[in-house]
Structure formats: C-alpha cells, structure tokens
Amino acid sequence: MGAVEVNGYTIEPGASLSGANLSDANLRGVNLNDADLSGADLSGADLSGAYLCGTNLRGANLGVANLSKAILQEALLSDANLSGANLRGANLGVAILVQADLSGADLQGTDLQGVNLERADLTGADLKRANVSRAKLRRANFTGADLTMANLLGSDLRMANLLTADLSEATANEITDWPKGFNPVAAGVAFK
C-alpha cells in the first residue's frame, strides 16, 4: 500500500505525524513503519493489520483502538494510552511500553517476546496464551489480569503486582524472576 490521505494527513512509512488527530480513522493495513506518531490521538482508530515497526508512539492515545494482528516490532509506546485496545494476535516483539496504560486491553495470543513493560498498567488485561517470554515486567501492575496459559519463560517479574492475576497453566522456567515472597506454583504456574 502506498501513501494515502486520512483526515488531511499523509499516511506513509517514515511520516511525521506527531500530535496528529487520527481518532476513529480507518488505518487498516497501512504502513507506518518508522513514522513519528508521538502524542498523536489514535483513539478508536482501526489499525488492524497495520505495519508500525520502529514507529514512535510515545505518549500517543490509542485507547479502544483496534490493533489486532498489527506488527509493532521495536515500536516505542512508552507512556502511551492503550486502555481497552484490541491487540489480539499483534506482534510487539522487543517493543518498549514503559509506563504504558494497557488496562482492560485484549492481548490474547499477542507476541510480547522481549518487550519492556516496566511500570506498565495491565489491570484487568487479557493475556491468555500471550507470549511474554524474556520480557521486562518489573513493577508492572497485573491486578485482575488473565495470564492463563501465558508463556513467561525467562521473564523478569520482580516487584510486579501479581496478587489477583490469574496465572493458571502459565509456563515459566528457572530463570523467570518473581516478586519477593510470590509462590508461582501455588498460583498455578507450570515449570518447564
């Protein structure tokens, strides 16, 4: 897909769209690799299947956006609002989501391998069958999150809030780091 015009903005790889208002826009399948969307309003936008590799989305509002099956590898999403967003089946490998708000987000089957979610809010998020291996999850808030059958192999969960998270059948290994005093076996985690 080549460059397209949406709400007066040119949508193309490497585009400079900092602070753009693209709320509720149809951006299905667009290529915004390496674009600057920092501080942009993408709330309610349809970005399903979009290509956002290496894209700067720092501080962007993606609340209730549809990012299902989007490719966000190495994207910068620190301080972004992704509350209630649909990220089902998306690929966020090695993305940076420090202090991102993912409360109530649908992350079922999402590839979060190697992501940095330090201090992120995942309250009530659905991470069933998500690949969260080798992720940095220090101080992340998983209150009420569903991590059923999630892959946590080699992840760093030190100081994360897991007290009301559902970890039934999640998998971990001996190098998975847990919060001090947390008993993963009692929480239903299986070790490989």
Image (cartoon, grey):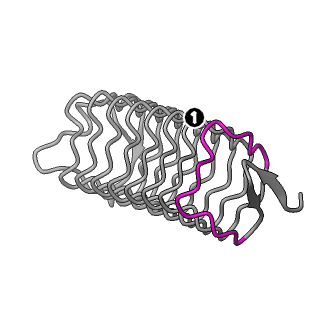
Q: Residue at x 59, y 49 (%)?
A: 21
Give the percent coordinates (x, y) of residue 72.
Answer: 62, 57
Whether residue 42 is in magenta: the answer is no
List the single residue furthest toward the right: 1
Magenta residues?
A: 14-29
Give the percent coordinates (x, y) of residue 157.
Answer: 28, 53
Does 117 sit left or right of 187 as displayed?
A: right
Q: Which residue is mark 1?
A: 86
Quarter assignment of residue 162? top left
Give the percent coordinates (x, y) of residue 160.
Answer: 23, 48
Up the image or down, 147 lies above or below 101; here it is above
**Category of crowding for the residue at label 1, using alpha-carbon neighbours closer than 10 angstroms: few (below 14), some (14–19), many (at least 20):** many
Up the image or down, 120 lies above or below 74; here it is above
Quarter assignment of residue 31? bottom right
Quarter assignment of residue 168? top left
Q: Quick one: 52 or 41, which is closer to the camera?
A: 41
Q: Residue at x 39, y 48 (%)?
A: 172
List the single residue furthest toward the front: 8
Give the percent coordinates (x, y) of residue 156.
Answer: 31, 58
Does 113 sit left or right of 14 as displayed?
A: left
Q: Residue at x 52, y 59 (%)?
A: 19
On-image quarter of the N terminus: bottom right
Secondary structure beneath dot 1 equals loop
Q: Quick one: 14 or 158, which is closer to the camera?
A: 14
Does 158 sit left or right of 52 as displayed?
A: left
Q: Quick one: 121 or 180, which is closer to the camera?
A: 121
Majority secondary structure of magenta residues? loop
Q: Residue at x 51, y 52 (%)?
A: 112
